[in-house]
Image: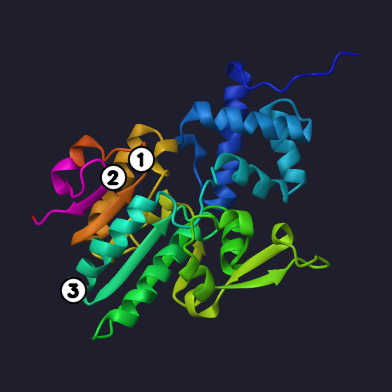
């Protein structure tokens, strides 16, 4: 007997795919119909093969019968590529110029890390902010929010435990100050079996939420001028152009004047909003919101 192959083709599967998106959107508030379809269908195909359902109609039935599969699907459709101090140049500029400048102007840091994966990015910002708190003569407020669409990733972020292999970009001074070495249950004290847990000092500086970025920005619940630093790295690239433009407009509105936006190296600010931002460091995707 020939084994069937998972496929997402034809008019019938297009309608089934639309029904699948509507089902996921109804439960989690995430509309994957607005994401790049080539990427979505490729990743979805892997879930079809894994669950041996072979088409969208069968997979939707499987999803309804196995609610735990929804987390697997969302993990598959959202890319989780992150590590501490990813793209070191960005964090060197944050440490040397951007964070001190924001503190001097606003006497506070209000940071939103969109698509924060397992928490590496907002925790990296918190470490830099903690060091600045020690150096500054006057105290300042620090509010850091990390958001991701995947519940499992947010749970990992709140737990704050990472294998040694994921901490290669962390400077020794931060490792010594902000990580405690722990063992996996039943493990032995060898490097490859060790976990490193973020200290409570840094954990307390960051809050995490699970949610759809597009939905949260469009909801109007985030007030204009809420943040002076927004990191939205490698998020827009997976969305279609219309959604990219809409999200960029919302980000512009909630970012304080003179605040900073950081996007991924492969991303660009939609042309309609480029007049609202100035690229402050040539060759680096860091933008400052212009005054009106």
Mark 3 element type: helix
Give the residue displayed 58% in from the left and 26% down from the top: 15
- Depth check: give the residue in front, 225 or 130: 130
Q: State which quadrant residue 156 falls in.
A: bottom right
Left or right of 103 on screen, residue 189: right
- Depth check: give the residue in front, 204 or 179: 179
The mark nearer the N terminus, 3 or 2, is 3
Residue 98 vertical placement versus 9 (above, below): below
Whole-percent x and y of residue 227?
Answer: 29, 65
Which label number is shown at residue 285? 2
Mark 1 element type: loop
Left or right of 19 on screen, residue 262: left
Residue 195 part of the magenta-drawn span: no
The mark nearer the N terminus, 1 or 3, is 3
The magenta segment: 274-291
Q: Give the quadrant of the C terminus.
A: bottom left
List the single residue furthest toward the right. 1
Which residue is the site of mark 3?
Answer: 104
List the single residue furthest toward the left. 292
- Depth check: give the residue in front, 75 or 60: 75
Residue 285 part of the magenta-drawn span: yes
Whole-percent x and y of residue 241?
Answer: 34, 33
Q: Are marks 1 and 3 in contact (CB under 8 Å)?
A: no
The answer to whether residue 218 is visible is no
Which residue is the site of mark 1?
Answer: 265
Give the residue displayed 59% in from the left and 28% down from the top: 42
Q: Are marks 2 and 1 in contact (CB under 8 Å)?
A: yes
Residue 80 vertical placement versus 181 (above, below): above
Crowd band around label 2 with a 10 angstrom C-alpha radius: few (<14), some (14–19), many (20+): some
Mark-to-mark CA distance, 1 and 3: 27 Å
């Amino acid at each position: 007997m020939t084994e069937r192959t998972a496929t997402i083709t034809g008019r019938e599967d297009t309608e089934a795919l639309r029904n699948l998106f509507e089902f996921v959107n109804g439960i989690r508030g995430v509309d994957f119909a607005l994401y790049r379809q080539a990427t979505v269908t490729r990743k979805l195909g892997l879930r079809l093969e894994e669950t041996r359902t072979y088409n969208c109609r069968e997979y939707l039935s499987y999803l309804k019968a196995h609610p735990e599969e929804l987390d697997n699907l969302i993990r598959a459709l959202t890319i989780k590529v992150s590590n501490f101090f990813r793209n070191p140049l960005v964090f060197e500029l944050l440490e040397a110029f951007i964070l001190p400048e924001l503190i001097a102007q606003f006497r506070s840091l209000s940071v939103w890390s969109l698509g924060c994966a397992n928490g590496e990015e907002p925790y990296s910002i918190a470490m830099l902010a903690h060091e600045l708190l020690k150096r500054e003569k006057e105290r300042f407020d620090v509010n850091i929010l990390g958001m991701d669409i995947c519940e499992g990733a947010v749970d990992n972020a709140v737990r704050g435990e990472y294998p040694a292999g994921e901490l290669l970009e962390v400077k020794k001074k931060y490792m010594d100050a902000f990580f405690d070495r722990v063992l996996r249950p039943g493990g032995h004290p060898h490097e490859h079996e060790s976990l490193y847990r973020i200290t409570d000092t840094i954990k307390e500086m960051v809050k995490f939420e699970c949610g759809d970025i597009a939905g949260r920005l469009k909801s109007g619940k985030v007030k204009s001028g809420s943040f002076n630093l927004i990191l939205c790295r490698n998020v827009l690239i997976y969305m279609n152009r219309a959604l990219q433009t809409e999200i960029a407009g919302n980000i512009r509105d909630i970012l304080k004047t003179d605040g900073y936006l950081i996007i991924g190296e492969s991303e660009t600010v939609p042309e309609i909003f480029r007049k609202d931002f100035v690229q402050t460091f040539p060759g680096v995707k860091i933008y400052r919101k212009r005054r009106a």
